[in-house]
Structures are given as structure tokens and as C-alpha cells.
Amino acid sequence: MVLAGLFAPKTATPPPNLPAFTTVGGKQVFAIAFPSGEVDYLYAIGDVLYDVRSRDPALAGQVLAAFP
């Protein structure tokens, strides 16, 4: 999943549903939007990858803020 984002331009506004880097809950995450309205937030630190999926960005931010 993460490798797909390597082809996304980091300086341009990506088209809908294209993975993008963003900041949520104070963490730099890789966000993948789904047609269902859910967004998958991938946050890597060290050799651990956290995956938070939510339709509520505020809730996702609270969860991600709690990670190291």
C-alpha cells in the first residue's frame, strides 16, 4: 500500500482517491481515500506501521495523536 504512494506527486494537489501525504493529529501520515467515504491513514514510526481507517477525520486525529 505504501509503495503506491511513491508515485504520487508530493508538491501538487493530487486528484481524488490518489494517496497523499498529510498531517493528521500532529503526525505525518499517508492518506488513502475510498469511494465509501472512509480514509485510511498510514503512520510509520521505526519498523511499525499503524493503520487507522475512519470516516471522521477528527476521530482519526485523536487516535493518531495518541501514537508515539
Image (cartoon, rainbow, N blue to C red):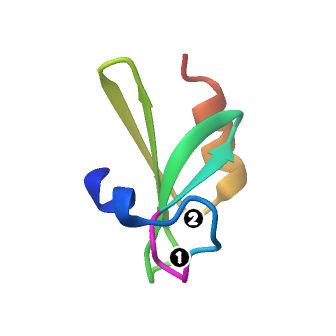
**Which mark is drawn over residue 13?**
none
Side of 25 relative to 30 (left or right): right
Residue 23 percent location from the top left of the image: 67, 45
Residue 37, labelled with which disc?
Answer: 1
**Secondary structure under the numbered disc 2 in the rendered image:** loop
Residue 17 is at least partly visible in this image: yes
Disc 1 residue type (three-letter): Gly
Q: Residue at x 67, y 56 (%)?
A: 57
The range drawn in magenta is 15-19
How would you classify the magenta stretch by its main secondary structure?
Answer: loop
Give coordinates of residue 17: x percent, y percent: 47, 78
Dot 2 amino acid type? Arg
Label 2: few (<14), some or many (≥20) within 10 Å? some
Is residue 63 in view from this perspective? no
Judge whether residue 64 is colored magenta: no
* Disc 1 to disc 2, C-alpha distance: 6 Å
> In terms of image quadrants, where is residue 6?
bottom left
**In what quadrant of the picture does the C terminus appear?**
top right
Asked if 51 appears above or below 47 in the picture, the reply is below
Residue lying at 34% horizontally and 32% vertically, measured from the top left = 49
> What mark, if any, has residue 55 been given in the picture?
2
